[in-house]
Amino acid sequence: MRFFRAVSSFLLLLLTSVLPLHARVVRVEVKSRQDVLGGKIFGPAGVYERITGHIYFALPVANPYNRRIVDLDNAVNLRNGEVEFSADFIAVRPKDERKGNGSLLLEVPNRGNSRILSLVDGGDWDLAHDVGDGWLLRRGFTIVSLGWQWDATGPDALKFFAPVAKDHGKTITGLLRGDLMPSRVMPEIPLGHLITGRMGGIEYPVYAPDDPRDVLTVRDSRDAERTLIPRSQWLFAHMVDGKLTKSDRWIHLNGGFQPGKIYEYVYVAANPVVAGGSFAAIRDFAAYAKHDPNAITPAERVYGQGISQNGRFLRDFLYEGFNADEEGRMALDGVLAHVAGAGRGSFNYRFAQPSRDAEPTSSVFFPTDIFPFTDEPERDPVTGETGGLLDEAVAEGVAPKIFFSNTSHEYWGRVAALIHVTADGWRDAPISDNVRIYHFTGLQHSSGPFPPARGTGDLLGQQPQSPLPVKYFWRAMIANMDAWVRSGKLPPPSSYPKIADGTLAPLREWAFPAIPGVHKPHEASAAYRLDFGPNWRNGILSIQPPKVGQAFPVLVPQVNADGNDRDGVRLPEITVPLATYTGWNLRDPSIGAPDQRVSFEGSYLPFPRTAAKRRRTGDPRDSIAERYASRADYMVRFNKAVDELVRERWILPEDRPALVDRGEQEWAVATGNK
């Protein structure tokens, strides 16, 4: 999508003579300011403080870098050529800024939830009682989490506050769509994105409940034909105190929504929020931190960090050209976009739905996995369209250092192969010198529990989840990014599956072993050529659901005889295995559609313990006893594998003991010798 249009020099000169052209942080409201753990000293960085508050931005509509924001000039609060937005924020910084390391980690929070500190350091997300080992704090980083999602829900959610848009004072209407696959019978569903059993984002209320364009359909899978549910069988209503009451935010279905079916609703909505201002908020906070001498979190370098939805946000941020601030300076010096796959998202559209992703059985055919996918320019052989993710950043001279990191799950559920293959699926694509692509082999979207356990609710899979931890990769990535930007020290080279060496293959050539009792997936998620109407590339979606064209090729990591992916950055659990770790897991029959994949999960499939058990069950994988002479033998090999990861800088030396201890625990769980 490209919203930036060439503007004549005369028009720009005229606009700049009468309107302010540079955004600014208008003001910062501090709501709370407390020393972390009562003034605990974190090494050379000293005492840290945690600050919460609200930050206000003003965006001049005439600035060419802001013209990319859909409906900005229709904002109801447009005054004196500027539109004001605001956002919640949390900042954790050295109390004495001179003791910090000069680097700011700018977290794009997942559905309003600030989590990077608890993920990387352990402890409480709000540092109230526990900071874990304080790794980020001991290193002197400043960490800021900035609200960007207008529809985020929950009492602790960091939110983005944006104005609605009007067309010269007139109400703007449009079609909105949502879908879901229930895991249990539900008499009614809320309008919004239900994800992992809770609301990830609210949606607009129904504007015209009797409009004939309001429809509800049902189908068995993503690609199955829709069946229209007669209007007499459903209505916009909600059960309150035992009585069915009309509601503009709920849908009631006679007989209830059934598990294992995809229900899709389309309805008329009104008053779209200028959601794309969130890109400018991230951009302008980075500029404020680096260039305003009075910034509440001063920094020399800013790294954008996002996981899943927020990794997609950062990919879209780069694609739409927001890494140049309003003076053309680089905003984010580095980007760490994790488990985003090839996705972008519904972030800068009229009636944007930021929480929508692209799961196996929900949020299907949204503007998420859309061309282009690669950082270097590519060509779609079907449409002839050309482009690359970094075209705008390169043209403006503001391409940051980038890590695109994914787990095995994203190759099954987020079409991750498309970020490094040609659009025809025949060849490996080149990647930029300032980009690294990392495949963390055997991990799932978010690390599962250890000891391994099955998911629950909507995430109840047939197998235990993959428990492989991502924490230590994160610490090394942050350290490597900081060294790369700060001093030019190159990070580890890219490591991902390739067509050329046979580690990436079409699904039909995927050679997973026949493990007793394990059902294999028959499909993987695909990216499609979508058409939302004649003006959708400019942010206006008029066709819902979209017209669905030809899919892009689907490729997945090839596996070895054990069923483990052959490529990538591999923990000792993969190089010295006790189990098979997959990027997929199928839905448990109790939640319906057992032939389809459960969202976000991988599988943990332990090896048989003895040769006798292997022969009795017909398991083709060697048993643990056949692989290792003893626990000591296993641990010698495990230690060597950890040492190799440390040597190659995938793992920090200080994290070596934790990984070795985890190896001892893995052996105990796999063999039953606790």
Image (tube, helix red, strand yellow):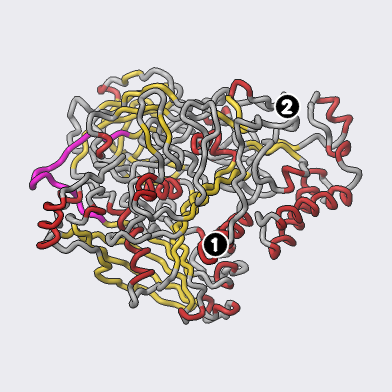
435 is higher (above) or lower (below) than 43: above
The image shows residue 551 at horizontal and vertical percentages of: 44, 24
Q: What's under tag 2, amino acid-wise? A: Ile
150 is higher (above) or lower (below) than 35: above
**Span highlighted in magenta in the image:** 162-177
The image shows residue 527 at horizontal and vertical percentages of: 44, 30
The residue pinned by badge 2 equals: 515
Q: Could you tell me which secondary element the residue under label 2 belongs to? A: loop
The residue pinned by badge 1 equals: 488
The image shows residue 366 at horizontal and vertical percentages of: 36, 34
Instruction: Name the foreground residue: 577 vs 669.
Output: 577
Residue 166 part of the magenta-drawn span:
yes
Instruction: Name the foreground residue: 451 vs 346.
Output: 346
Residue 628 part of the magenta-drawn span:
no
Does the CB distance between marks 2 and 1 fall below 8 Å? Answer: no
* Point 41% across, 43% down: residue: 389
Q: Could you tell me which secondary element the residue under label 1 belongs to? A: loop
Q: What's under tag 1, amino acid-wise? A: Gly
